[in-house]
Amino acid sequence: MSLFVAVPVGLAMGVVFGFLLEKGRVFEPGIIVGQMQMRSFVMLKMFLTAVATGAVVLAVLHGLGIVKLQPKAALYAADVVGGLILGIGIALAGACPGTTLAQIGAGYRDAIFTLVGGLAGAVTFSYAEPWLKTTFLGQGQGKITFADLLGVPYWSGALALAAALVAVLIGLELWRPWRAEIGRNADGDLDAPAERSSGPRIVPAE
């Protein structure tokens, strides 16, 4: 895909992603922190829906020969350590890399510091990566997909994964309906009864 095609496509995908992120209220700090505390599952539902949809779309595009799979190296130790660092950052900041710009657009001033911190972390990692590759964090199995691990064609593995995620989503929704959770205070007071608020209370910048 040429640069002239990739840039407009990327921008269009970003607009759609941002729109759905805002409508799903997943960018709000209280929703994000509530997920990290396992007290709200709106964020998990949104992300699992994205993974299931992406798996189906990628399976179709790969099957038609439109896209080629380009998996990252499977570095298990790095995945665990990186996931822990990311999780701690999300819990403390009430934001994740995909929601920071949406928060800034909605008027959350603190998100600016999150963005600056994320950029500083990315620059720091770029300098530290060559050294990190020489440690246990750089050890792994190379570039493989979950379908390779299972020994099945990618399309069948992707569709099976999507079906499993849909089953999980149905179970989560039956257990914790989204209407009840969205009605809670998005500024962190997730113990407040849903009926006290018709929706998350957003406090953007003046």
Image (cartoon, helix red, strand yellow):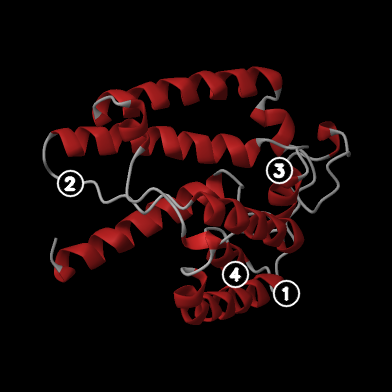
Quarter of the image for residue 34 reads top right
**Residue toward you, 112 or 140:** 140
The quarter of the image holding the C terminus is bottom right
| Secondary element type, mark 2 | loop
Quarter of the image for residue 65 reads top left
Q: Earlier in the sequence, mark 3 or mark 4?
A: 3
C-alpha gap between disc 2 and disc 3: 33 Å
**Residue toward you, 85 or 94:** 85
Residue 35 marker: 3
Q: Earlier in the sequence, mark 2 or mark 3?
A: 3
C-alpha gap between disc 3 and disc 1: 27 Å
Q: Does 96 sit left or right of 134 as displayed?
A: right
| Secondary element type, mark 4 | helix
Circle 1 sits on which residue? 206
Circle 2 sits on which residue? 67
The quarter of the image holding the N terminus is bottom left
Disc 2 + disc 4, Cβ < 8 Å: no
The percent position of residue 113, horizontal first and vertical second, equals: 67, 77
